[in-house]
Every structure is written in C-alpha cells, then in structure tokens.
Image: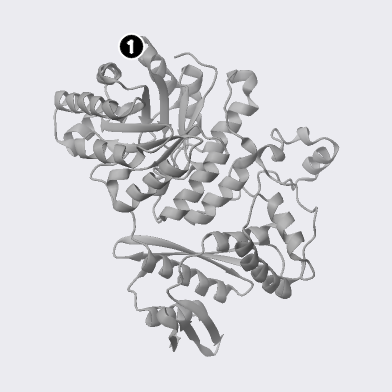
Amino acid sequence: MPEDKVYIFDTTLRDGEQTPGVALGVEEKLEIAHALERMKVDIIEAGFAASSPGDFEAVSRIAKEVRGAVIATLCRAVPEDIDMGWEAIKHAASPRIHVFISSSDIHIMHMLEKDREHVLEMARTMVARAKKYCPDVEFSPMDATRSEPAYVFRMLKEVIDAGATTVNIPDTVGYAIPEEFADFIRAIQENVPNIHRARISVHCHNDLGLAVANSLAAVKAGARQVEVCVNGIGERGGNASLEEVVMALKTRKDLFGLTVGLDTTQIYPVSRLVAQLTGIPVQPNKAIVGANAFRHQSGIHQHGIIKLRETYEIIDPRDIGLPRGGIIVLNKNSGRHGLRARLRELGYELTEEELDRVFRAFKELADKKGEIDDRDLEMLMKEERRATVEVYKLDLLQVSCGNHLVPTATVRLIGPGGEVLQTTATGTGPVDASFQAINRLVGLPNRLVEYQVKSVTEGIDAQGEVTVRIEVDGHQFVGIGSDTDIVVASAKALMDALNRALTRVPRGEGVWSNP
C-alpha cells in the first residue's frame, strides 16, 4: 500500500501503562484518550481488554466516547481474548482488533511451549476469528526481529490471507539496529507476495536507545504506520516516543517526503498530562518536550537566538504548543481571570470547580513565595490532575529535628468518615519520622521503593517536588507532592501513593508478554 502519509498508532494506554509503577484509573485513561483525540492521533490502542476487568471497562468507555480515532484493543491469539476484545470495542466508530503471537524460536519454545506449525495455525485462525467481528484487523508477530525471516514471511502471508489489514513488525526487546531493521522491512515487501493488501507497521522498543531511529529507518524503507507512546514511556527502556517520531517526520519532510495528520500544537500539553497522570516525569534533556529542549545557556547560543531563532532551534516551540512565557506576571495580587488566561496559554482548560481548587492552591503558594512562574503553575496542575479520592487527608504535620535532637514528627490525619487520627513517631530524619507516623495511622503495609526530590524552580523560596514509589502486595503505586517545605512535600507524596493504593485495583497481568 504505497502512501504518502504515516499513520500514528498511539499505545500509551496499553504499552505505556506497562511502565513499572503506572496504574491508571478508568477516568484517567479516558482523559488521556480525549487528549489524543484532540491531537488527531490516527489509532489509539485503548488497552488490553482481556487482561483485567478494569482494562475492559476502560477500553469499552473509550470506544463509546472517543469518536475521532480508530480504537484498538490488543488480544492474544486465543478465542477468549478475541471475543472479549470485540465486546469491549464494538461500539467504537472505527474499531480495530490487534492480534499478536510470538514468532521467535526462543519465545515459541520457552513461553508458548509449542511448535512452529501450531503457532502458525493459531495466528491464522485467530485473525480469521477477529475478521468475522471486525473488518480492521492488525497482526503482530512478537519478537519478529529475533525470528527466522522466512518464518515471519510465511506467517505474514497467511494472516493477510486470513484478513489482516495491518501487519506490525515488533522489535519487542529493542534488539534491532536501524540499517538492519530497514533491510528487514524491505525484505518483507519483497518476500511476502500479498503484502500489497496490508499496511506495514512497526513497534520499536528502546532497550538500546534506538526505538525512534529504527522507526524512522522503517518508514524510509516503506512502513506507513508507527506505534509510539507519549514521552517514550513503556516497559523497560520504553517505546518509540510519539513527539520525536512526529517532529522528525515534520522537520525533515525534505528527506522523508511524507505527511502526518497530527495537530502538533497539542504535543506539549499532552506530554504534560501523561507525565502528571502516570507520575513518570519528563527528563530535562528529553528531546522536544524536556524542560531544556528550548533553553539556551551558552552566550554564543543566546546571541544567535536573539538575532534569529533558527540559528539554534530547528523547531519553533509554538509548533508543539509550548508558550514562550512571561506574557502575564502572576503573584498574590493576581485574580482568577489572569490565572485562567495563563493556564490556557499553557494548554489547560479548567472547569469552574477545577479553577476554584487551583486558585486556592495558587493563592496559598503565592503567599509563600511571591511571584509565580510557569513551572509553579504546572506543578499546581500536576497535583490537580492527579487528585484521587482521599481516603485519608493530611491535616497537620509538625516536625522537630537538629544535630542534637532525635527527629520527631507529629501527624494528624482525617480518616474515612471524618474521624481524626493523630500520632507521634521518631525516625532517622524528619522525612523518615513523618513517614513512620503516617504509615502507623494508615495501617497499610508497604515498602518504599523509590524517593526522589527535585526543585521545581530556583531560589530559596523554590517549590520542591517529591516523587515516591511504594509497593503494596506486589503492586507499585506512585505518589507526587509539592510544597516550599520539602518535608511537607514528602508527606503529601506518601499520602498520594497510599490513597492510590487504597482506592485502586491495579491492572491485571496477562498470561503472555505483549509486543
């Protein structure tokens, strides 16, 4: 299918959610799906419907409510998955069933414990089963880049004959090198006689840091669908980054000669939304959407940018929806209209109820630190977007510490039903003492897996952002908190993680791994 458009298949809600520690609720998934719809993503993989009741509900809700994109669900090559997948997406305006099974000998022997012919039959019959439900069927031979090419060619031919309209080539463990991967895509076009009846897609993982490079090499070789995640999240090293693939194709249209249908001005706000709801921060030096992507410290660079932006920027930040900042100065005297206007420039549309909550938090912060910049506002929005049902609410935190004192924390929580709970605990430091007291009151056994602190802004009055990751019954939950007092921020982060653990059933794990 020679085309001049590259279709963007976003799997943030499926492969992206497999990032360790990420457990999105149904409403959070729906919010991300609507954001992807506004960005005009071609295909949204809404989840793995058969993996858990929560995933089934999320996929079904997205299929019913998101109308501007193809809605896909991943299915193993087994009848129950196909049937349940169709039940979840059948109300979509444009549904797609995505069937996968392993094609590499290492997977066939050690995971499936079957022989090649049996696996081939499963692929063929399950694609045919999906085709009876849905005209749009995608097939993935998992771990294709470590498979015998002739076997992959044969499998692709048979699933296309069975009704597959898209064949996806996954580099499941990030093993491929760009030139090698491009050769593989060309070989598929040369050795699969009916390949003209299907669109070639690629799904690259980033274990060697080559997911985007491999995806672009495949596009040059003839692939016309790329599977990506916002911010490049996903299992292990992550997936090909949506923003990097899209902006590479747009920026180097002179080389690729291809188009993408995305509204790129939505990239920055969607990136921030995904970071906020998943709790996975964007690293400062991340291409396209990192905090440093359009910052210039070198005097030579600054001089060039002032004279002509293009001297050191190949992308206009406005093309990804990034405001230049500084248009409205906000402080404790600013009103609701000024706050709403600045938040709109940053890509946030708030209801009146949301604005009320953010405005109260804004006023509290402005009283502490005076002038508020965009990073402070993004931190306020991060807390607003991550708001959970508060089973327990932090009402008071008081600590004492010093080089001749035992660190001590007194914590008061408002518990379920409004009861007031209070205790005092000691620890190795003020944060540890606070955590000991909170855990004693909440009573949910957990293990602290990760604790990160970073400054949101500069100066002695800067906000601190704390991210904690806790493990409860084998499942991990991320909590985020911010405050000008880092101990308070730490307590808020732990409370966020605990409330998420108390109010959420983590997504189930499938029997097999995914592409």
Residue 69's place in the image compared with 345, above or below, is: above
112 left or right of 84 in image: left
Residue lying at 75% horizontally and 47% vertically, measured from the top left: 324
Residue 122 to residue 509: above or below: above
Residue 214 falls left or right of residue 328: left
Nearer to me, 408 or 95:
95
Viewer-proximal residue among 158 and 252: 158
Give coordinates of residue 451: x percent, y percent.
Answer: 47, 65
Residue 377 drawn at (x, y percent): 67, 60
Question: Does residue 283 appear in this view?
Answer: no
Residue beneath label 1, please?
Answer: 194
Q: Is residue 222 left or right of residue 381?
A: left
Residue under the image location 56 percent in, 76 percent down: 488
Closer-to-camera residue (15/173): 15
Residue at the image position 58 percent from the left and 23 percent from the top? 259
Point out residue 342 in the picture as x, y percentages from the top left corner.
73, 55
Residue type at numbered disc 1: Asn
Q: Quadrant of residue 112?
A: top left
